[in-house]
Amino acid sequence: EVERRRKTIAPRYEMTTTAAPEGVAFPLDAKGARTTTAAGKAVWAAAARGLQSAEGEALATELTNERAWRHKYDGFATRLAELQAAAPRDACVASCAAGLAALHGTFEFVRKGGAGEAASLTTLKDAMDTLTAPHFHTGTIKGRRSYTKGTNSTELSSSDLMPGRALLKRARGVG
């Protein structure tokens, strides 16, 4: 009875959608659905092949052919990390670069159109190369109190919290 109840409470969750996304999106598959499986396999396989070793190639082939990817991808990620850790520095960096390049070439970037405009679709790489707004900022926040070992430095009162713009002004020394 427990097994039957579990199936009733938690039906299988389908990880595909055809809804029009905005921003970074998984690519459409041959059936027109956005699925994580094919894209995930492509990126991890590219990273494994980027090691340029027999072990990396074997891992890429094995994960590409895995039918139970959804349940086993963590094991493949661990094996890739182990191969990268054991590889020479240049091979590890090449592996990461290959995975990132595959991600940029595989994933899509969707920007919804305004009134009367069509949505635009491009690769994530093209979006990263051409789209410039909005800009993100990096700042450093320096505390005024010294840290005393054994105190809880993460305790904040509601008066310590600031909305984003006020925090940005404070960080820039304006407010």
Image (cartoon, rainbow, N blue to C red):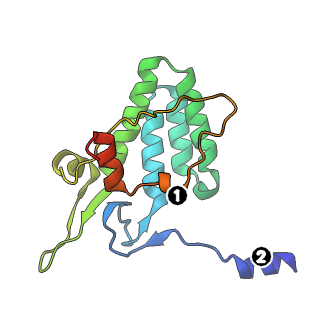
Query: Quick check: 142 above or below 113?
Result: above
Amino acid type of the residue tagged 1 in the rendering: Ser
Give the number of the disc on residue 158. 1
- Quarter in which the N terminus is drawn: bottom right
Residue under the point 81% across and 80% down: 4
Disc sitting over residue 96 in the figure? none
Element marked by disc 2? helix
| Label 2 neighbour load within 10 Å: few <14, some 14-19, many 20+ | few
Residue shown at the point (48%, 35%) measured from the top left: 48
Q: Residue sitting at 19 percent across and 45 percent down?
A: 129
Q: Residue furthest left?
A: 116
Mark 1 secondary-structure assignment: helix
Badge 1 crowding class, 10 Å Cα cut-off, few under 14, some 14 to 19, many 20 or more, is: few
Outermost residue toward the right? 1
* Of residues 86 and 57, the one drawn nearer to the viewer in this rendering: 86
Q: As shown in the figure, which amino acid type bears the numbered disc 2?
A: Arg
Q: Position of residue 67 (x, y in %)?
A: 59, 57
Classify 160 as above or below 27: above
Q: Could you say where residue 11 lies in the image, as x and y percent from the top left? A: 66, 77
